[in-house]
Amino acid sequence: MAKPTTPRPSRATAKAAAPAAGADHNRPRPETPTDYKASKEELLEFYRQMVLIRRFEEKAGQLYGLGLIGGFCHLYIGQEAVAVGIQSALKPGKDSVITGYRDHGHMLAYGIDPNVIMAELTGREAGISRGKGGSMHMFSVEHKFYGGHGIVGAQVSLGAGLGFAHKYNGDGGVCVAYFGDGAANQGQVYESFNMAELWKLPIIFVIENNQYAMGTSVNRSSAEDQLYRRGESFRIPGIQVNGMDVLAVRGATEEALKWVQGGNGPILLEMKTYRYRGHSMSDPAKYRSREEVQAMRDKSDPIEGVKAYLSAQGVGEDELKKIDQDIRKIVSEAADFAETSPEPEMAELYTDVLVEQY
Amino acid sequence: MGIAIKMPALSPTMEEGTLAKWLVKEGDEVRSGDILAEIETDKATMEFEAVDEGKIGKIMIAEGTEGVKVGTVIAEMAGEGGEEAAPAPKAEAKEAPKADAASEAPKKAESGTSKLASDVKASVQDPAIPEGTEFVKTTVREALRDAMAEEMRADERVFVIGEEVAEYQGAYKVTQGLLDEFGAKRVIDTPITEYGFAGIGTGAAMGGLRPVVEFMTFNFAMQAIDHIINSAAKTNYMSGGQMRCPIVFRGPNGAASRVGAQHSQNYGPWYAAVPGLIVIAPYDAADAKGLLKAAIRSQDPVVFLENELLYGRSFDVPKIDDYVLPIGKARIMRPGSDVTLVSYSIGVGLALEAAETLAAEGIDAEVIDLRTLRPLDTATVLESLKKTNRLVVVEEGWPTCSIASEIAAVVMEQGFDDLDAPVLRVANEDVPLPYAANLEKAALIDSARVVAAAKKVCYK
């Protein structure tokens, strides 16, 4: 019998996984996180980044419609609070990040130049992967952003490897491995959970639960649909977080970092979120109603949420308008850059297959 | 006469072993399950149990004796029944003990791999080795271990990860001693979880380390092939040269002895089909060492295909500090003028053996060991063809879409005018490898088939 497919966003404060019946109650567990207390400046920065992601993605959607972007293109609209909230808690150049193919938002939140991201989407020489990766395969080793992976779930094992490298090198860094509710059903995720806990790897597993694995809702695909519990049998504690609220996301990330940096091994954060667009640009999204999407936009929009926090701190529309205008300019310049940059030279076809000459 | 206690076969490939220690002496009463002796195979020291009750009569083979053939009578026991019976070993005796000529015990079924296990040496020295170099007799197994140990000493970033690589000292003993020298931080046992640890290794390489990922055999790497191909091989290209993946995936590949279809296949052609990978498949111990060191140093992802049947074979390894070989260079193992035999891994031994037979019949064969399957050293092959005008590819693997097919295509495209006969492929039969000894034998290549093919292209 099918369970109701209506998403259940938890507006309430984050809840940490209660130990299962018969579990070892003496085992230490992370504290239940509280919402992050952001300063006005921090809130403005969150707002700026989230609006940048949204406008960027809208523009990418347009360019796709014009045929300037090809292939698969997965937009992050609706999920902005997750990447922005988590990235803001990380130390650039020290902590590493890896994600799947819905990666534009994470890169922008990491401060990577929108021009080179957009130019990659249009397949140009100036793109961050010289036009050879595309939307799903972008990397910035300089920013410790390790992709950008097209195989669902692969980034979880790879992320555990990055965590392994942090521990091996003793550099104090933490890896954040993002994956979706769809990837959460892949076998290798659990292989990685097992080893990550066994070896106490410094890694935060982040499930961005946007409710749909392409067209299949969590309820139709997951025997345990409370995904934050998925690490329990590996002794990895899980916390369910309102992923539509950037302060809840940041607060939970602080707690997760404390846990991981305390040498306790990995932790799992389930970010309950929602994507407004289809799975990719070619998805008609017939598996959910317009009303459902509209209700999320009306009641839970992450950008509107930050606006409300800002308003409470006395920041008016005027100040935000200024930011909005700046962002529109950045995005429009990125689009121009991506449209006018030349395609890769033919010689690029054969470069970078191997590093060395044999 | 009492019960003859015979040297047991303690692994699928064991042919002889060392009687390390007797735990009983003449006149001792033993019961079923008592440990009689410790026997050292090339992989491990195993305990050998009594099956029957009785008194130990005469001990025929003293402890410490090396090279005791499977099936040799090592002691006699005065049994109650007085009937002759062979004791079964405690663990993993997958074959009946080999009978000696006088015994009535069932004849040991001879694996088809016995004819593969040639250790014929190259007739010419690798030109890369300077004249006057001293050589040390080394097994392929030791050579591989030495390569890893040397690279681990030289580079802190190098570590070994896989199933049973540390405390067990390697399922095939290849990592023996590494845990003792380098500790648990750098020699890491994993759960049985190929997809997961291949991904962790690949991620660690992306994060700047130099992993050596051991697969217990490459058959199990099929569970992990996504990371080898999609994650490791493609990242440098997809990132526009930004993100490297310097990793070695290594382990035994190809047919082992009597282990059936799921544990017996050659993945050389599979991986060699993938741009972004380096694929190496050495034959002798010197190449195993020199190429594994090169693989660990390479900034590219390497699939390093070993062969279980060769692990215990001894070859001369040059005593040179830091012996590193170039990747992507084939080696002429035996010069000749009438026909070129191209092979790699265990097939090289068969090609050399065939060349000896052919020489006796007046055909002078040149034998080329490809050593690296990707990138393929086609120049060496084409150069040889110019001289011999005839070519046979010898491959312990399936014929379809094989390395042999690839060589045939390259030769047809680039060496057509040099050919005096069609290129022939000597490969395994196009079937999953059967278990039955006679069928296994029929499915695998042997030197007689190589000889026949060589004669055919020479029109003799």
Image: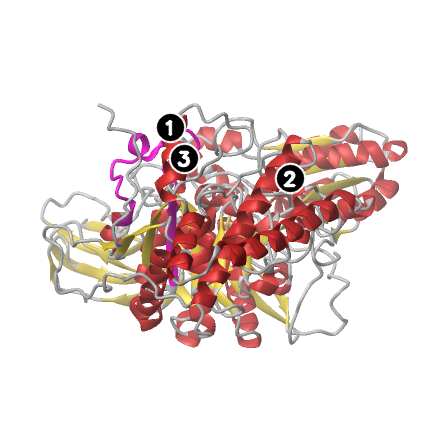
Q: CA distance from mark 2 to mark 1?
A: 49 Å
Tell me residue B297's x, y (percent): 63, 65
Residue depicted at x 32% and y 35%: A218
Residue depicted at x 27% and y 45%: A10
Q: Nearer the viewer, mark 2 or mark 3?
A: 3
Residue B418, placed above or below residue B68:
above
Q: Which residues are magenta?
A: A203-228
Does residue B209 belong to the magenta stretch?
A: no
The quadrant of the picture occupied by the C terminus of chain B is top right
Observer able to see residue B418: yes
The amino acid pointed to by label 3 is Ala
On screen, residue B258 versus residue A76, left or right, reads: left
- Give the number of marks: 3
Are marks 2 and 1 in one subunit? no
Number of residues whose C-alpha sits closer than 10 Å to that of mark 2, classed few (under 14), some (14–19) or many (20 or more): some
Chain assignment, label 3: A
Chain assignment, label 1: A
Instruction: Look at mark 3 in the image and give the residue it sits on.
Output: A213
* In front of the other: A131 or B7: A131
The amino acid pointed to by label 1 is Glu
* In front of the other: B342 or A76: A76
Identify the disc placed on residue A291.
1
Residue depicted at x 52% and y 30%: B443
